[in-house]
Image (tube, rainbow, N blue to C red):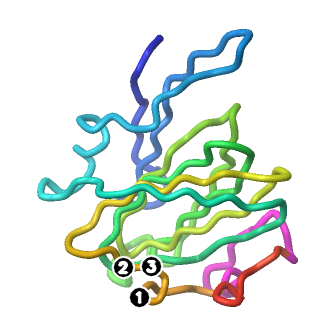
Amino acid sequence: MSIKFDIQESQEIDDVYILTPSISRDERGNIWTSFLKDEVEKLLPSDLCFKHDKFSTSKNNVLRGIHGDSKSWKLVACVFGEIQQVVVDLRESSPTYLKWQDFIINSNNQQLILIPPCFGNAYYVISQQAVYHYKLAYHGDYIDADEQYSIKWNDEKINIKWLSNSPELSGRDK
């Protein structure tokens, strides 16, 4: 069994990384590694490490995001189901400001996306259910929902091509 990642910087948005794990498959299913400290944390600023993990379970047609903050690095993955993962550059000084990139993530196309601070993070659930994993790195205390920013999911300036025109949204995401 191989425990390694193919790590590539996005060709579309500066400072976003795509990590593709090696996956061992057999008649029982598959197994893959979601985190290797020495491999993944070298992509963070040198004084930062991952502090905690969160999981979110969502049903079909749910769209979560676009959320972000100014200090959290997020390593995100879909560990069950299928999603459309979207990352939006919200750094006003960036040459890729308001540019977005999406990824279809599922068991056949397993990827982890490293999202820096000042980026929007969102995902749409394609399968009947999905389990989403966040691994978070930040200085100080965690900035939770009440301190994060939210961008409207269908903001015309960004113009994301979502896989649904009428997703199920929270009050925050409307």
Q: Position of residue 37 (x, y in %)?
A: 27, 38
Q: Which residues are magenta?
A: 153-166
Callout 1 crowding tier (Cα within 10 Å): few <14, some 14–19, many ≥20:
few
Count of numbered circles in the view: 3
Up the image or down, 116 lies above or below 81; here it is below
Q: Earlier in the sequence, mark 3 or mark 2?
A: 3
Residue type beneath disc 3: Leu
Tell me the element at label 1.
helix
Dividing the image into 4 quarters, which one contains the C terminus? bottom right
Q: Which residue is mark 2?
A: 143
Three-letter code for the amino acid on which mark 1 is drawn? Glu
Left of 70 or right of it: where is 65? right
Q: CA distance from mark 1 to mark 3?
A: 16 Å
Q: Position of residue 100 (x, y in %)?
A: 56, 67
- Per the image, label 3 sits on a secondary structure element best described as loop
Determine which residue is flagged by label 1. 147
Marks 2 and 1 sit apart, C-alpha to C-alpha, by 6 Å
User: Percent x, y for residue 130?
Assistant: 72, 52
Q: CA distance from mark 3 to mark 2?
A: 17 Å
Q: Is residue 103 on the magenta stretch?
A: no
Q: Main secondary structure of the magenta part?
A: loop
Q: Which mark is residue 90?
A: 3
Residue 47 versus residue 33 in the image, above or below: below
